[in-house]
Image: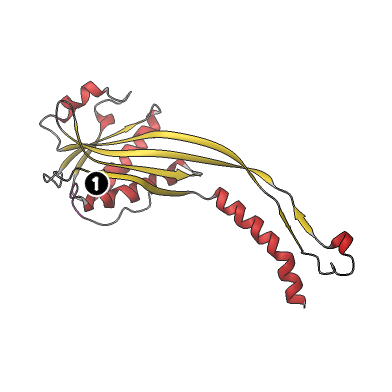
Amino acid sequence: MKKRIKSLMLFPILILGGTLLLSGCESSQITTEWHDPEYHSGPMKNVLVLSVWKNKTARRIWEDAFVQVLKDRGVNAVPSYRYYPNEVPQEKDIPNMLKDKYDGLILIQKVSEQNRRYFVPGYYGFGWPFYRRYGWMYGSMWDGGYIAHERTVEFETSVWEPSEDGNMIFSVVTETYNPTSFKDVRNDIVKLVIPKLTKNGIIPPGQEPKQM
């Protein structure tokens, strides 16, 4: 009987706690992926990495993360801030940056960010052990609802071959729910994208990306 009473009282708490965990956890996944089936020029040996951020520090952190993983695989990777330290290069400048120097460009950019508020309904059920005798007063348990917040951020990582107009050969869109830190989102995206680049023959195989 005591075990049954404890389980009855604990059940709504577990439901509430589980809901809170689901609404607050960070998770990243690939939602869209595309590659050019006619691309057979890889793996690339010299790559320029460009991350589109207005914030200079954020831009450097993202570019360095990809550069480090690529170098670990024997790729000569260079961050774009070496050429344009103060601002992101304009689109018209990219062909000259790549010309006769790089096999390709890895471009990382945030494409969307959404914030949503929604109502999580309360829980109603029998939870008090003496509901048979005092049912009119203690026979049910009500846990009121609450307002939860959800934030979704999408990033696109694409790879381009050098050409005057640009030739995209690979692209993935990643979606992160409720990001908790800048670092965690970056690490998630690197871990998701690098194996895809290897699978499609764009970069050489190597060890899986480490925690940065």
Q: Is residue 10 left or right of residue 176?
A: right
As helix, strand or loop, the secondary structure at mark 1 comes to helix
- What's the residue at 57%, 49% (across, down)? 23
Task: Pinpoint residue 5: horizontal percent, then vertical percent.
Answer: 76, 71
Q: Circle 1 is placed at which residue position?
A: 70
Q: Magenta part of the protein: which range?
A: 201-205
| Relative height, residue 170 to residue 196 (above, below) | above
Which quarter of the figure has residue 119?
Answer: top right
Which quarter of the figure has residue 88?
Answer: top left
- What's the residue at 66%, 55% (across, down)? 16
All told, the count of numbered labels is: 1
| Relative height, residue 11 to residue 80 (above, below) | below
Task: Pinpoint residue 194: horizontal percent, then vertical percent.
Answer: 28, 49
Q: Residue furthest bottom?
A: 1
Which amino acid does the dot numbered 1 rest on? Leu
Q: Is residue 208 magenta?
A: no
